[in-house]
């Protein structure tokens, strides 16, 4: 479905990605783990077209995305819940969801109901401005908003960041449910243990390069991964 | 080698300069300085003043100049800024060697430049500055061709009280030298009729909204409003009053008779009266010729600025002729003796302060499209 | 005219002027929300709209009202062109560069107007009539009633636009977070142009509304723009309702102060109130984020 081939990208003079090769298959869930500053978020932004690759290709079902504007990429079927949630705080929950469906011309009522079924709390708060929501609720809204575009591939950037453990469990449960409906997911996470648990495959990034890749089970067993990312959490399991 | 060449070139240049200057000074000419606003907000009056002076100079030169000497007018722009007026007058006197300076328009500018003229002992003739202060300072080198604010105020107030029968009066004035002085003159004359204005309101010359001032005037129910400022704010005031559905008799001192007042205010300008030194009526032969020439050249009727400037130039020319000399001191002494000079708007006589003794007309806006005026006083 | 009549007169005039300030202030709000920068050329967009109207009317080939509508539309187009040529290249630059650019654009507008139309005020056709409605002893001018009505209609339309239409909502989204708005598939460049189109159209509307009373002159953007800027700051810089309330308050205050205190102090009073409000509430009456730059 998605294939990054030898992608180089960065901000101005500063190169962040130095030859990324990455693949997400149809209805696959893949995670991308790595230390802070390894280039995980930049990878997602490059896929979305927010950052332009200087070299390499982003192939999505045969579409070459590297030179297309963001709205064409969204239309092609990729959407993203950004790091830090970044909901539109002054707009209502419902308006946030409507923005997620901005490019769609078909009726969206049913999809809003779908999101409400996934996140019942959003229905209760539909008319409230998004800034009054709790962190977990805002994360749900960010994911719901991304789902409103009816993506074939959903990019999630640190969905568990800053959330209480109970809420983290809940979010991952929902991620699993979304994947089961047939949406492919590329997940960027600090919480490598959780990420490897829900994912089928994973990539490990180190300073702009893919250092390792493999099935989630392989990576969980890999001593280097255990040492660097799983730490006590990994040993406990 | 190089140095030698430069030396020769320089010598050649010097010789030719000497030769040229000797040539140009051969026919004697009379240099008259002119300082008026030619750009900025007051450029309108300034340009007309310049045209009047130029027209008079052309007339003189066509008749052979002053005692055979051609008149040359040197113009400077002061942008209605007193600092620039002072600098311009200094330049005209010390660099250009003008023997008489005509200018400026705004009272503030003329007041600032007067001392420079006195120090240099060169006469300064202001065609249109009407503040009383100008001739109250004991300056022996200043002469004024327009009637002072008090002369105009006396005529206007008398007309309003005696002919129009107005009793309830209000004043709105610009808080500059002209407006403040005009206000004092009107208040003083009203007092001689036993009247006190019901409202006296000031505004900054730059104000673009006069509704507060005019609302206060409306609240007093005044029948007559003395509007003592230039024509642009008066047009705004007339419009604003029309907005309020309140139409007092608007009266002004000199500054309001400008076509632009009517152009800007439209029918709100109807009925405004204003003192005036000159109206292009063509009642005398000299006036007829003046109007003809002006129309031929500029395709419009001359206004009072043109006439005042024309008269200023002519008064100066006559004084130079009588003095028979280009000594500014002698010219000043002859200027001071000017008596019953037949000006375009009536006879001019300078008193011992340099102020003019002349008649004042009162004109009324009676038509808007095209603008039309009628002299309502003297009848 | 009695005391209560005077009061009615003053309040009516204050509200009419306030409505004009509010229209201009709305333009400031739109740009501030979108870019996080004060658009110091806003008043000059108003002047430009006014002269465009005057120019179209003077051609004599277009009916008056069509000319005025066309002037507002052309001003919107002018806003778009200026955004593309002057402002867009600076979008990612420090906000001080953007700010300086708005000042420069304002100066260029004024100088061009001066070259083309001169420095003197010009008469603007009085298309609103000058009827006066008597309310007791007070006279309420039809023009002022029109100005206030048009401003009120525009504000309601604008609020509806932002609350109910997809494009309006997208503009709010862009003003909150430009990058995430792009993730939604919103064309933020188009949005920015639309923002400039609307804000300069608002200015032009204010311009053609007041010109019949106050004439058209090249410096009008500065004299009215300054009051509108105060309204915008008083209202809280990022609130539409705030700009409207701020404009009405400034209009009322300067008229009340001018009549009941002294005309010499009318500006002083509004600025003292403005400063007092900012000390008490640094974000202005309805502001939420004060003066930080939008994301």
Image (spheres, coloured by chain):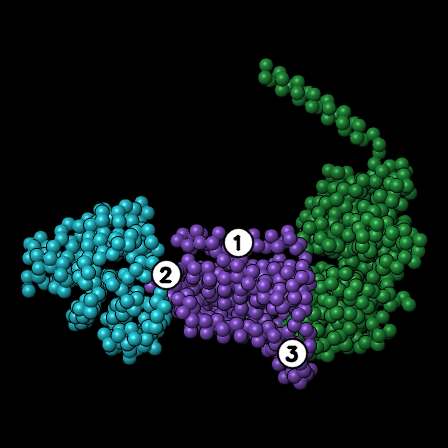
Chain colours: A cyan, B green, C purple
Residue extending furthest toward the front: A62
Q: Which residue is mark 3?
A: C140
Task: State whether discs 1 and 3 lie on one chain.
Answer: yes
Name the chain letter of the residue that bears numbered label 2.
C
Residue C90 at x, y = what percent?
43, 52
Mark 2 falls on what kind of element? helix
At x 19%, y 63%, the residue is: A27
Q: Earlier in the sequence, mark 1 or mark 3?
A: 1
Distance between mark 1 and mark 3 Cα atoms: 37 Å
Mark 1 falls on what kind of element? helix
Numbered mark located on residue B5 in the image: none
Circle 3 crowding by C-alpha within 10 Å: few under 14, some 14–19, many from 20: many
Name the chain letter of the residue that bears numbered label 1.
C
Q: Which residue is mark 1?
A: C105
Mark 3 falls on what kind of element? strand
Distance between mark 1 and mark 2 Cα atoms: 24 Å
Name the chain letter of the residue that bears numbered label 3.
C
Labels 1, 2: front one? 2
- Asked which quadrant contains residue A231, the reply is bottom left
Q: Earlier in the sequence, mark 1 or mark 2?
A: 1
Instruction: Tell me, yes or no, if residue C100 can be seen here.
Output: no
Q: Which residue is mark 2?
A: C178
Residue A134 at x, y = what percent?
26, 72
At x 80%, y 52%, the residue is: B299
């Amino acid at each position: 479905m998605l294939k990054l081939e030898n992608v180089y990208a960065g901000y101005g003079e500063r190169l962040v990605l130095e030859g990324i090769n990455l693949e997400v298959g149809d209805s696959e869930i893949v995670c991308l783990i790595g230390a802070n500053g390894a280039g995980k978020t930049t990878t997602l932004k490059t896929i979305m077209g927010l950052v332009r690759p200087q070299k390499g290709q982003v192939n999505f079902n045969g579409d070459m995305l590297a030179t297309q504007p963001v709205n064409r990429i969204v239309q092609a079927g990729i959407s993203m819940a950004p790091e830090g949630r970044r909901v539109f705080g002054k707009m209502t929950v419902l308006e946030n969801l409507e923005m997620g469906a901005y490019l769609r011309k078909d009726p969206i009522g049913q999809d809003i109901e779908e999101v409400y079924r996934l996140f019942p709390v959003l229905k209760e708060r539909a008319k409230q401005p998004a800034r009054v929501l709790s962190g977990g609720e805002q994360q749900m809204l960010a994911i719901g908003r991304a789902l409103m575009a009816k993506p074939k591939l959903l990019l999630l950037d640190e969905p568990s960041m800053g959330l209480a453990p109970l809420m983290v469990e809940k979010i991952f449960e929902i991620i699993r449910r979304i994947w089961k409906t047939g949406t492919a997911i590329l997940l960027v996470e600090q919480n490598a243990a959780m990420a490897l648990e829900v994912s089928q495959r994973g990539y490990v990034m180190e300073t702009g390069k893919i250092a390792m890749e493999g099935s989630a089970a392989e990576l969980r067993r890999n001593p280097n991964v255990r040492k660097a990312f799983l730490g006590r959490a990994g040993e406990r399991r | 080698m190089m140095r030698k060449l430069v030396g020769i070139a320089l010598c050649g240049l010097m010789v030719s300069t000497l030769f040229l200057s000797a040539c140009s000074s051969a026919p004697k000419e009379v240099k008259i300085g002119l300082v008026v606003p030619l750009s900025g907000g007051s450029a309108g009056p300034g340009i007309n003043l310049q045209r009047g002076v130029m027209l008079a100079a052309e007339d003189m030169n066509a008749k052979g100049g002053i005692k055979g000497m051609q008149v040359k007018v040197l113009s400077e722009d002061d942008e209605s800024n007193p600092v620039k007026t002072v600098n311009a007058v200094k330049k005209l006197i010390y660099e250009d060697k003008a023997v008489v300076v005509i200018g400026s328009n705004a009272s503030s500018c003329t007041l600032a430049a007067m001392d420079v003229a006195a120090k240099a002992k060169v006469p300064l003739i202001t065609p249109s500055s009407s503040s009383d202060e100008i001739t109250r300072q004991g300056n022996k080198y200043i002469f004024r061709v327009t009637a002072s604010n008090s002369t105009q105020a006396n005529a206007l107030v008398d007309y309003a009280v005696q002919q129009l029968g107005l009793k309830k009066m209000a004043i709105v004035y610009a808080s500059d030298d002209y407006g403040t002085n005009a206000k004092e003159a009107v208040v003083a004359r009203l007092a001689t009729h036993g009247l006190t204005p019901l409202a006296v309101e000031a505004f900054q010359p730059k104000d673009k909204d006069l509704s507060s001032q005019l609302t206060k005037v409306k609240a007093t129910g005044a029948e007559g409003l003395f509007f003592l400022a230039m024509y642009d704010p008066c047009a705004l005031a007339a419009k604003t009053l029309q907005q309020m559905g309140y139409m007092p008799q608007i009266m002004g001192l000199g500054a309001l008779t400008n076509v632009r007042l009517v152009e800007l205010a439209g029918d709100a300008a109807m009925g405004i009266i204003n003192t005036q030194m000159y109206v292009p009526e063509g009642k005398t032969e000299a006036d007829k010729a003046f109007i003809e020439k002006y129309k031929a050249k500029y395709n419009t009727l001359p206004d009072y600025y043109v006439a005042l400037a024309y008269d200023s130039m002519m008064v100066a020319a006559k004084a130079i002729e009588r003095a028979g000399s280009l000594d500014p001191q002698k010219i000043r002494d002859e200027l001071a003796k000017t008596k019953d000079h037949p000006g375009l708007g009536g006879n001019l006589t300078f008193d011992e302060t340099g102020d003019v003794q002349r008649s004042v007309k009162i004109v009324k806006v009676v038509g808007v499209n095209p603008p039309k005026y009628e002299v309502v006083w003297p009848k | 005219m009695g005391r209560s009549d005077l009061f009615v007169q003053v309040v009516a005039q204050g509200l009419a002027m306030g409505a004009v300030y509010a229209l201009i202030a709305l333009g400031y709000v739109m740009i501030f929300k979108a870019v996080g920068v004060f658009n110091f050329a806003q008043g000059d967009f108003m002047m430009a709209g006014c002269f465009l109207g005057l120019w179209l009317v003077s051609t004599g080939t277009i009916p008056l009202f069509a000319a005025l509508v066309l002037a507002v539309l052309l001003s919107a187009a002018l806003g778009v062109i200026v955004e593309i040529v002057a402002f867009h290249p600076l979008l990612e630059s420090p906000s001080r560069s953007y700010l300086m650019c708005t000042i420069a654009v304002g100066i260029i507008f004024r100088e061009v107007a001066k070259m083309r139309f001169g420095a003197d005020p010009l008469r603007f056709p009085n298309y609103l009539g000058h009827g006066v409605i008597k309310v007791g002893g007070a006279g309420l001018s039809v023009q002022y009633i029109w100005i206030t009505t048009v401003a009120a209609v525009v504000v309601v339309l604008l609020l509806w636009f932002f609350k109910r239409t997809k494009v309006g909502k997208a503009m709010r989204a862009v003003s909150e977070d430009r990058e995430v708005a792009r993730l939604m598939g919103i064309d933020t460049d188009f949005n920015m142009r639309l923002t400039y189109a609307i804000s300069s159209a608002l200015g032009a509307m204010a311009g053609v509304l007041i010109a019949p009373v106050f004439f058209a002159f090249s410096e009008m953007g500065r004299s009215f723009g300054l009051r509108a800027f105060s309204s915008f700051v008083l209202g809280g810089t990022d609130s539409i309702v705030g700009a409207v309330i701020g404009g009405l308050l400034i209009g009322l205050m300067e008229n009340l102060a001018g009549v009941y205190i002294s005309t010499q102090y009318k500006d002083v009073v509004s600025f003292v109130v403005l400063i007092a409000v900012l000390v008490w509430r640094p974000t202005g009456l309805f502001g939420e984020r004060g003066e930080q730059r939008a994301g």
